[in-house]
Image: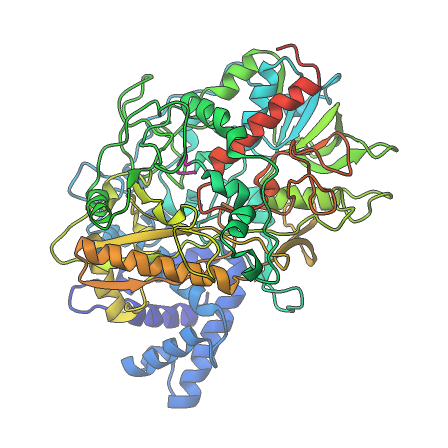
Amino acid sequence: MSEAEAARLEAIFDRMFPDDGDGYAAAGMGAGDYVDGALAGAESENLPAYRRMLGWFAASARSRWGKDVTDLADGQLDELIGELERGDPAPAGCFELLRRDLLRGLFSDPAYGGNCDLLGWKFLRHRGLGQDDASPKGLKEWHGRSTSPLPAAFDLDAGRRPPAKDVDAVIVGGGAVGSVVAARLAHSGLKVVVLEAGPWRAGETYRPDELGQAFYGRAALGPKFNAEVPRWVRNVSDVEDRALSFSLGRMANGVGGSSVLYGARFRRFHPHHFQHYSALVRRGLADALPDASSLVDWPIRYEDLEPYYTELEWTIGVAGEPSPFTPRSRPLPFKPLRPFRVGEEFRGAATRLGYQPYTIPVGRVGEARDGITPAYDPWDEGIGAEIRERWTPMDTLLPAALETGNLDLRTMCRALRIVTDRAGRARGVTYLDPDGRERQQDARVTLVAAYTFETVRLLALSGNSARPDGLGNSHGQLGQSYMSKMFPQVVGQFSDKVFDRHTGPGGQAIIVEDLMAEGAIEEPDIFGGGTLSTENQLLPLQIAGDPAPIYAPRWGEGYKQHLRGWNRRASIKIQADALPLSTNRLLLDPRWRDRSGVGDPVVRVVWDLCEADRRLYEHMQERAEALLLEMGAERIGRGPIETGVGCCHDLGGARAGEDPAHSVVDPDWQVHDTPGLYVYSGATFPTCPGINPTLTIWAWALRNADNLAHYLGASS
């Protein structure tokens, strides 16, 4: 930015975060310096937007008052900022960028140029990385603790070798799903090659860097994902598109995928979730479903997955309490994580209201075991942890699978296309190796184990002369019935309680599932249920950027006052069932290309929230308000229902089913129109229950991997 632009930005920031007598103001805290550095480096693509926005401020100030922005009275500058927030007549969309960068400049680590002298954290009374100290600490004072090397059997240069011979299965993606499946097949005696686009990161590469590494920040652990962010429109006729806005955050690339970031919350789907449509038929509600509803029963049942749920819980070492609504053949292996203040307040109030709250089962070490002493560190979930308190497949499964000699794990290898033979059978994958050479890995079967967006994109890009519209798309089903979740919150303000949610991980969580039980919500125009939960972990950018309740302003003195009360605030998060709709789908974008050097089309997401789902969210917000009142909240406000499209729980697009006319894959996840091609991904889910999907994806994947190993004649 020019000196004049920088001065105008400082003036604007000082009205958005003004000195109201406490000595804290944006300019003196380095917010402008942060933006200047970001625009000169990591976020240079935003410079045109800033120039357009600051130009509008300058022109408006000159035309209305004959002054420069820096000379405006407070009320005059507030008037312009208000217009920018409304987007009329100011440039649309610029306010969110401006506010986001203001908060990053105030509350991210000083390593990024803002938060001078840790003033932002001192304003919040947040200790930063100094969890055991009274004064804040940043990355400058941080010293890593990890000494964990990569497994001895892992070859860092495996991707540079020529394609392997006599391979049983090639797997696209060594992330959360691909790594679990690869280990299963390798232990069964099959020869497996995994092509992973990212690296295997050693523990010491993870830093408690909220802005740089967090999946809601710059998401540095997902460079490939960041280079191919899907575009979003509400319906297929929309001309104006925008990048996905992400209600939770972005995905990671690398061995283990986003399991390096996830909360490791391992909840089972309820039995009725596998027969949701039939449940509505029994209740006489099916005929009232929206016209665009594509709700169906799953091709499997809870009983098919229960043994795999149990196996995974014990393999992982899950700690928590069992849900009252999911039958099980074996208890959980470890007791819950330690109690936390807001959780116990929530538990007491929920119990008094007749609910059955329980501690969410998580894949975290809650007590000393296996050589790990839990630190209850709030700086790992969503960021990546150097010390493995959260379970990932890289901890035990993959090292053991590599030791079998059956697993060939090739990192920095990006899949390009699925290859089929003249008969239409999948025969392998073309990919770019770490040096950019295009190669082809053949195998008896090909498994696509990428995240939902990349899975659908790869199938669509791999069309051939017989199937020009993509593999799995002979009946126009590829990309159909895409599902995403919103995560609205209801916030309660207290005067007599301090919750200290910054002192532990988000895995410390309490939940109520009663409103998700079959028929729990007796409303004729609501077709699902939802959960209410509260959790720990509040880092500085989370505190500042949390969706403000409707009673709180988003900038100015009122926002500062609201921010001061963060430690006396409790929030209840809602996760609800989402109806599959025929109008929501994934396509190849006709204009936008990825920026990774390959230049393929990115995914175009067509998604809108239907009124039935909106009614469900509103009903859940009412229940959350009642719960906060019971907890003693003195002021309650709802956050927005639409929290962003793209949510880390993106499902559908390659639906599983028995009928090829209405699905992409069969119950074993083989693509109907392409023998030898399998999709191991949440893209196969027919519906989207309001429950974290990872455990169910893994359970179904292990079931299908066992069936595949039997089909391929595995030795064990």
Q: Residue 606, image x and y in percent?
A: 61, 59
Q: Residue 600, image x and y in percent?
A: 70, 48
**In the drawing, does residue 286 fall left or right of residue 67?**
right
Q: Residue 371, image x and y in percent?
A: 32, 17
* Residue 443 higher or lower than 354, as above or below: above
Q: Quadrant of the C terminus?
A: top right
- Answer with the quarter of the image where residue 521 lies: bottom left
Q: Residue at x 55, y 34 (%)?
A: 301
Q: Residue 128, image x and y in percent?
A: 26, 44
Viewer-proximal residue among 34 and 287 = 287
Residue 533 falls inside the magenta stretch: no
**In the drawing, does residue 170 fall left or right of residue 269?**
right
User: Is residue 409 in sight in this rendering?
Assistant: no
Q: State how the image is colored.
A: rainbow
Give the overall secondary structure of the magenta segment.
Answer: loop
- Answer with the quarter of the image where residue 546 lies: bottom left
User: Is residue 399 in sight in this rendering?
Assistant: yes
Viewer-proximal residue among 585 and 211 = 585
**In the drawing, does residue 177 fall left or right of residue 385?**
right
* Residue 557 higher or lower than 682, as above or below: below
For the record, the magenta segment spans 262-267
